Image (tube, rainbow, N blue to C red):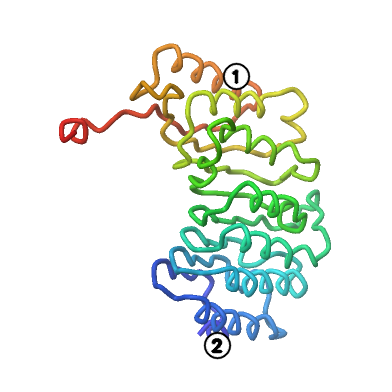
Amino acid sequence: ALATLPKIQATELNGRSLGDEAIACLCRGLRERLDKNTCTASSFVHSLKLGSNELSPLAARELGEILCLSRQRLGCLMPNLLGLDGNKLGDEGAEILAEVCSTQDTIDAASNSVKTFSLEIGRNNVSPRGLLAVAKSKCLATCLEFLGNDFSSLSGGSAETSFTERLMKILQTEETILPRLDSLDLSGTQLNDQDVVQLCGLLSAVGFTESLMPKLKVLSLGDILPSSRDLQEPSEEQRSLVEDSIASLKQARMGIVVAWKFFRPDPLEEAQQ
C-alpha cells in the first residue's frame, strides 16, 4: 500500500505485534516509493509510528536504510518522525541505526532547507551508550528535533552514578551538540531533585546555552522524586532548590518551557499498603 498509494503520509502501527518480518515488507514498499521519479519530500511518508511491535536491531537496520535512501533521493531524512518506542532495540539497535545513517554525508545544520527529524526511542532498554551513538551520528544529530520519550532504563545504573551524571557524559561529548533539538522528553525517567538541579545547571551554564542544544524550547521532566530514600515526596528544601534551578534555566534560555511536577504518592496505594 505504501508503494501504490502515494497520498499516504502518516502511518500509525503502534501495538500491532508486527515483528521484524513485517517491517522488512513495509520497508520494501517504502523503497519502491522512493525509487519512483515522482517521489518528493513533500509527498513521501512524513510520520511512521511503530511503537510496541517487538522490533529487534534487525528492524533498526531496515529503517536506517530507508532514512539513508531518503537522504540520497530526497535530500533529507524521511520519514521525519520515526516512532520506535517500546520495542526491543537495545543499544545494538540504536548503534545500528546510527551506523547506517552515518554512511551519509553530514547535513548542514545551518541550511534553512534542512528538515527536522524526530526520533522516539524510549522504553527500548537503551543505555547512555546507545544514546551517545545516535548523538554522534552527525547525519541524525544535526537535524534531530525531538529525542524521547521515556528513558527509564537510564536510571538503572549503579547507585554511585546518578542519571544526570550519565546524561552529562553524553551531552558533554565533543560531537554531541544537537543544534536543532527543539524538544527533550525525559518524563518517566524517574528524575529526582538532585538530578534536576544538576541538569538545569548544565543547561544554564555559560557557553552551553549557545553550544549545547541551542534551540531547545521544551524540556519535559515528568514527576520529580525525592533524592532521599526515607522520603515519599520531596521536602520543602528540595522543592525550593528545584524551583530555583528551573527559574535559573528559564532566565538563561529565554522562552524555554519546562514541564514538571513534584511526585506525590497515590493515597489509595498508601491505604492499601
Q: Can you say whether 200 is above or below 123 in the image?
A: above
The residue most toward the top is 237
Residue at 55 percent of width and 37 percent of height: 158
Which amino acid type is shown beneath numbered disc 2? Thr
Tell me the SS state at disc 1: helix
Q: Can you say whether 36 is above or below 106 in the image?
A: below
Q: Position of residue 246 (x, y in %)?
A: 54, 23
Q: Can you say whether 82 is above or below 169 in the image?
A: below
Tell me the SS state at disc 2: loop
Q: Position of residue 223 (x, y in %)?
A: 41, 33
The mark found on residue 248 in the picture is 1
Disc 2 versus disc 1: distance between alpha carbons? 52 Å
* Along the line of sight, the residue nearer the viewer: 183 or 272: 272
Residue at 42 percent of width and 24 percent of height: 226
Left or right, residue 148 beside residue 142 = left
Q: Position of residue 25 (x, y in %)?
A: 55, 84
Are circles 2 and 1 on residues that touch, CB within 8 Å? no
Q: Earlier in the sequence, mark 2 or mark 1?
A: 2
Which amino acid type is shown beneath numbered disc 1? Ser
Which image quadrant for residue 133?
Answer: bottom right
* Along the line of sight, the residue nearer the viewer: 142 or 235: 235
Using a 10 Å C-alpha cutoff, classify the residue at mark 2 as few (fewer than 14 neighbours), some (14 to 19) or many (20 or more): few
Left or right, residue 189 beside residue 144 = left
Using a 10 Å C-alpha cutoff, classify the residue at mark 1 as few (fewer than 14 neighbours), some (14 to 19) or many (20 or more): some
Residue at 57 percent of width and 53 percent of height: 126
Where, quadrant-wise, is the C terminus in this rendering? top left
Residue that badge 2 annotates: 4
Q: Position of residue 162 (x, y in %)?
A: 57, 32
